[in-house]
Amino acid sequence: MRTTIVPAAGRSARPRQALSSLFILLLTAVCLTVAAPASAGRPDRQVPTVSVTSPTAGATVSGTIFLAATASDDVGVTQVKWYVDGTEVAWDGAAPWAASWNSASWPAGSHTIYARAADAAGHWGTSATISFKTSGTAPAPTPTPTPTPTPRPSATPLPTPTPTPAPSGSTPPGWVLTMSEDFDGSAVDTSKWAIYTGPGNGGNGQRAASALSVGGGLLTITAQMVNGTLVSGGLMNKLNQTYGRYEVRVRTDADPSLVTNGVVLTWPQSGNWPVDGENDIYETMLDADRNPFKTFVHYGTTNQQYYFLHAADGTQWHTMAMEWEASAIRIYRDGSLVWTLTDAKAIPDVPHHLAAQLDAFKPTMSGSVRLQIDWVRIYRKA
């Protein structure tokens, strides 16, 4: 039934209309106020931005290289993935965004790479695609040697020597600390390090994250047979810089099977090996008793090398340091300067990063071998 309201004689209907309008306005304001929290809680809709920074466009790379990207988002980036020729090849879950990739697993020739970044809301941003080339070969840190050592009578690894505590407040004069690692946690800190995965050195076995462990203040990389496959590993630091001082306290088990090579080195961010150099600070080669161990500097298009033999037992703890400047590379062992290289042609002048690897030079081995690192320090010139 429809009701018509007739105003009383002499009275205007406007006040009731004003009240009705005021009621509608109040009701609208209440509705908007109630709806506001839903609007404020609306999911983040901004897509992260990302770009590939390594390899660079047009670069030719070989072996295990450093993939890097920059990424940003209004809330925060949670992960980055890299894709070569449309196939996912690497992932990182913590900034700075970097990972390792074995380029030798791809055929030689031209390829493309792009990266994708995600935020907590699950939105993915995609970078521009760049082109680069692979050589299709994986360079060994040094040419495969033909060792003639006297094997130890047992394949049982030596007991772990007691490491020396990390230095405290002992920054060398003229240097500024840029990275410090004591391996005091229970796992590799992926905000500082990228772990190798994929085929092993020269296709021998596999590099896997399972080969790395952190405990007792030590990083341990173990090479051993796992279900018929030789599994070992390595990792690279995410800090790239041109020149610097690198310190590491390191040892490697003896290897009577003559299969593994323990090495701590700097590798070019570009992956352009050997042109952009390689500095092997500590390398055992395949000698069973790790005595002597070596330092190598690789350079030039034909992989020319300088080397130094350390008359010391590589199964024991040693503090190795390399000072890399434009005019010289200086190698220190246990606090003493033991070698200086001044050939300008052999000194790289492009960004490098530190890496540690326990490489296999055969497809099978007996027993197990460990490369262990107590601490790492990286400096730049003051």
Image (spheres, grey):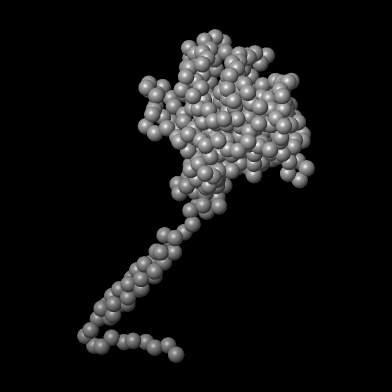
x, y percent for residue 74: 45, 46
Quarter the N terminus occupies: bottom left
Residue in view at x 48 percent, y 53 percent: 44
Of 111 and 212, nearer the camera is: 212
Of 79 and 335, nearer the camera is: 335
Residue 321 visible? The answer is no
Quarter the C terminus occupies: top left
x, y percent for residue 327: 48, 12
Residue 63 shown left or right of residue 126 in the figure: right
Residue 5 shown left or right of residue 352 in the figure: left
Residue in view at x 72 percent, y 39 percent: 367
Q: How many labels does the image show?
A: 0
x, y percent for residue 291: 63, 23
Residue 31 visible? The answer is yes
Residue in view at x 44 percent, y 64 percent: 38
Residue placed farthest to the bottom in the image?
1
Q: Give the quadrant of residue 287.
A: top right
Of 273 and 144, nearer the camera is: 144
Q: Give the quadrant of residue 223.
A: top right
Residue placed farthest to the left in the image?
10
- Determine whether 338 is above or below 45 in the image: above
x, y percent for residue 257: 74, 31
Residue in view at x 48 percent, y 43 percent: 184
